Amino acid sequence: MAKLFRWTFRGALLLLLAVTLFVLHSLYFKPVSIRIFYERVFAEFALESPQIISSLGMLPPSIDWTADELDDYSLAKGEEQMAKLKADLATLRSYDRAALDDTLSYDVLEVFLQTQADGERFRFHDYPLNQLFGIQSNLPSFMASQHRVAGLAGAEAYVARLREIPRVAAQVQEGMAHREQLGIIPPTFVVEKVTAEMQAFVATEPTQNILYTALADKMAKADEAIAEADQQRLLADAEAVIRDAVYPAYQGWIDDYVALLPKTTGNHGVWALPDGEAFYQHQIRVHTTIDMTPEQVHELGLREVARIEGEMGAILQGEGLAEGTIGERVRTIAARPDQLYPDTDEGRAQILADYQVMIDTIDAGLGPYFNVRPTQPVKVERIPEFKEKTSPGAYYQPPALDGSRPGVFYANLRSVQEIPRFSMRTLAYHEGIPGHHFQLAIQQQIQGVPTFRKLLPFTAYSEGWALYSEKLASEIGFQPTPLDDLGRLQAEMFRAVRLVVDSGLHHKRWTREQAIDYMVEKTGMPQTDVVAEIERYLVMPGQALAYKVGMNTIVELRDEAKRELGEGFDLAAFHDVVLTNGSLPMTLLQQQVRAWIAAEKAKAGGVEAAVAG
């Protein structure tokens, strides 16, 4: 018996040693299996970002050791991440692609890593503090909407994260100083608007700040009850940290931007930055995942604007509006009393409720058109008031991976005049169902693929699908009136105009005002909305191109499938191909759809041969 025990013990030690060596080898060297490499790449990326871990709900609160930390924004960390990215690309290419069962995962990761590596020279061609997605507004939004407080430990971690903000602020300042040395200075309006936003932020009483009120709300609703004494203690701590640490950190940013303002040179596109033309060409590739020149983008936009103008004109004439620009006539309808909600709290609450009804109604009617559906619902909420003035009209936040948070469609309620009823269905379908929610939630549900395939974003795919969803909703009867369809066409015109103004600003050297005037004329959007959009393009060059380029690609692929398959074309099956592979570059989506078409034709040919036989 003793001998058996010794051999069993030695065997266990050998097994433990073998497992340990295998794990260490997989962590520090090229893993034997590419699937292990895929997971290592994802794990190392995600685990370096405490904020991503919280956003995705990757770890249960009881074992989330990163919940009291914020990300590392230092220049040294950026250098380390770029070196790792290039090393990962080299390791990926050391595997024999031809021997793999899953070449799509290889191709997706290769495209993503190569595109990022190609952009190394443009790492600092951005503005960390900006009016749209700047760190100064994203940090409070992250704390309010994504830091989870399941019990006392989560609340303690929340306050600990508040104490991290001065460190983040110092690292961001380091990066801003480096950008200034390189000649990367934001447009004037960015510095002016963000300075005003931050000044308003620090002028708020700490107990009225979103960082404080969000904590109070989270503790009151925690899954595990938090004692009243602990709640009061943590709220007192939060108040002190906001006043004594967070506000001084923001004041440092304010001081930097006040000093930077005289150095700005106007509201120019990225052509005004060092190496700006090459940067814009790179951004086109990043966001469209298709090779297009800025001139091709501009010409495509002009053609699409002309086509959509004709379709909108026909509806407007049916409404008795035959004179004036498209924009003027659309604004006439948008200002009609029957199109506006009361400018009250009750009116805004009704907007949110109506959006929810629209989403729930189309969700119930999509059975014949989709075989695969998300398991998580969509909830409609208001964009936090402190950031709505500089935020877009709406955006979507995907569900947490652990199911603790549904998908959320955030609507901007800064002005009811910006939300005419005829435009609401289209926005609900784009941000919610079957738009971003279907695409992103289904991507999270995909089985049998590396984790990165469930999360990796490609803008042309995600935004192209959302814009395609607007068209699909109309085709299957969920834009029931001509005015509803006018709302869809206005949204498509909006995306076509983006091709013109984005390339205009960054390639043809249009002024901010020139771009604003063009968008107002062609879309009929409110001036405030248009200004926010044009200023968005100035800080996110190329991103706005992805919508129309992506949509056009999906529609062209659907048309191709219809031509090739004839009566054998199945719309739900087409949607399966587009959605169940996750987010793809457009070039790889084209390959997947064409492979499906070939397989369907071969299947049909086999059936015909069997029948004939």
Image (tube, rainbow, N blue to C red):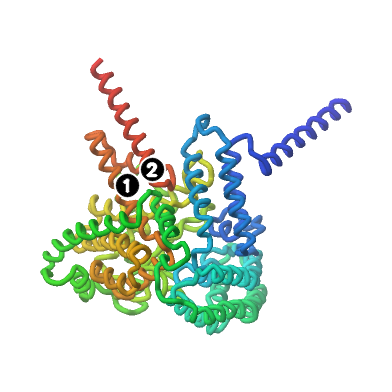
Label 1 environment density (alpha carbons within 10 Å; few <14, some 14–19, many ≥20) = many
Whether tag 1 and tag 2 are in contact, CB under 8 A, the answer is yes
Whether residue 581 is visible: yes
Label 2 environment density (alpha carbons within 10 Å; few <14, some 14–19, many ≥20) = many
Q: Identity of the amino acid at label 2?
A: Leu
- In the displayed structure, would residue 321 be above or below residue 425? below
Q: Nearer the viewer, residue 310 or 138?
A: 310
Q: Is residue 399 left or right of residue 85?
A: left
- In the displayed structure, would residue 542 be above or below residue 20? below
Q: Is residue 4 left or right of residue 125?
A: right
Q: Secondary structure at mark 1?
A: helix
Q: Nearer the viewer, residue 455 or 503?
A: 503
Q: Name the image quarter holding residue 155.
A: bottom right
Q: Tell me how far mark 1 sits from mark 2, CA to CA.
A: 9 Å
| Mark carried by residue 231 | none
Q: Name the image quarter holding residue 93.
A: top right
| Mark carried by residue 589 | 2
Whether residue 144 is visible: no
Name the residue that disc number 1 marks.
554
Q: Identity of the amino acid at label 1?
A: Ile
Counting residues from the start of the chain, the first of labels 1 and 2 encountered is: 1
Q: Residue 480's spot in the image, x, y percent?
A: 21, 58
